[in-house]
Image (spheres, rainbow, N blue to C red):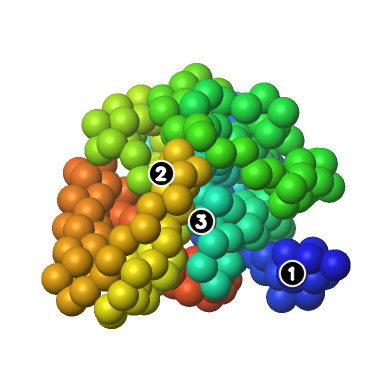
Amino acid sequence: MSLSIRNAADPAYAKPFEYVISWKSASIQLGSHRGTQRGLGLDYRGNVNLVDYPDARRMDIRETLRDPFEQVQVRQFNQESTTPIYAICDLSSSMQFKGKQRKLDKAIEVATAVANSAYHMGDLFSFIGYNSHVLEDYTLPLSRNLHQSKETIAQLHDYRTMHVGAEGVTDVPNFLGQSRGLVFWISDFHMPLSVIEQTLTAMSAHQVIPLVLWDDEEYKKLPKFGFSTMIDPETGLNRTIFFRYEVRAKFITAFNERRHALEALFLKFDSPALFMHADYKSETMTHYFEQNTNL
């Protein structure tokens, strides 16, 4: 039995987290978020007279007594509604990198956690997988079918495709709905910054949460001295490198500079990134939303 399957059987695997949205959902379906549709809820939207909204249960006695036209006033509220939740997953070759854990296996766990969280919040969930193009076999439309979502995501445990890039992400926005949604973009973001910027621009109608999956063995835990064979995940070719202090330092510097560039780009779109070096923890995801209350 593989490690990923054993983890999947663990009660703590892909534990749901709490997320919030800052906008009012336009959905007519009842959910857990503030909405724009009139109905039974706690979000006060104003008073109207009883003739326009004949619901005596909402009568506002104080405002009725104050009304100069002696109209019976009733309170109106907005109902709580659903919002679309998307998990878009990078399936390019770089996600096959394995240090403590294969990046794609961590992505599977995170995507499953997003699906579990959407289900617990009563929201609609969609999964979209891509490499050099959007992979329809690993793409599901918005639904509340948690079993189907988790089943499709779990199939990626056997996914081993190499020699493919991530440029297909530029087509992902065409698979998103018109209503504003919360988009969890799961990737190591080892792609040109221009591709990332183009995609963020196309997804500007949505709130994007970049989840950056990096592994310390990519750059922090390299050999201090001596030869080491490394696999280029984009080509699948072995590269033998003689490591010494200067070479190792260049790797670390390159990754640090890349991190700063990514952070600046994401903040440009009001989408602060969450860099995930360690194991997935639901508390980390929940804390992200607590820290970024302006999302």
What residue is shown at x 26% (from left), y 70% (from top)?
243
Q: CA distance from mark 3 to mark 1?
A: 16 Å
First reached walking from the N terminus: tag 3 or tag 1: 1
Q: Is residue 58 left or right of residue 275?
A: right
Which image quadrant: the N terminus?
bottom right
Q: Residue furthest left?
A: 246
First reached walking from the N terminus: tag 3 or tag 2: 3
Q: Which x, y percent locates residue 280?
A: 56, 69
Q: Residues within 10 Å of mark 2 (few under 14, many from 20)?
A: many
What residue is shown at x 50% (from left), y 43% (from top)?
236
Give the label, 3 or 2, closer to the camera: 3
Depth order, front residue of 128/79: 128
Name the kind of residue labelled 1 in the image.
Leu
Q: Quadrant of residue 134?
A: top right
Q: Quadrant of residue 46?
A: top left
Depth order, front residue of 235/155: 235
Q: Residues within 10 Å of mark 3 (few under 14, many from 20)?
A: many
What residue is shown at x 47% (from left), y 22% (from top)?
171
Kind of element beneath mark 2:
strand
Q: Is residue 52 above or below residue 155?
A: above
Q: CA distance from mark 3 to mark 2?
A: 24 Å
Which residue in the structure is indicated by mark 2? 208
Which residue in the structure is indicated by mark 3? 97
Q: Residues within 10 Å of mark 1 (few under 14, many from 20)?
A: few
Depth order, front residue of 260/294: 260
What residue is shown at x 42% (from left), y 58% (from top)?
230
Kind of element beneath mark 1:
helix
Which residue in the structure is indicated by mark 1? 3
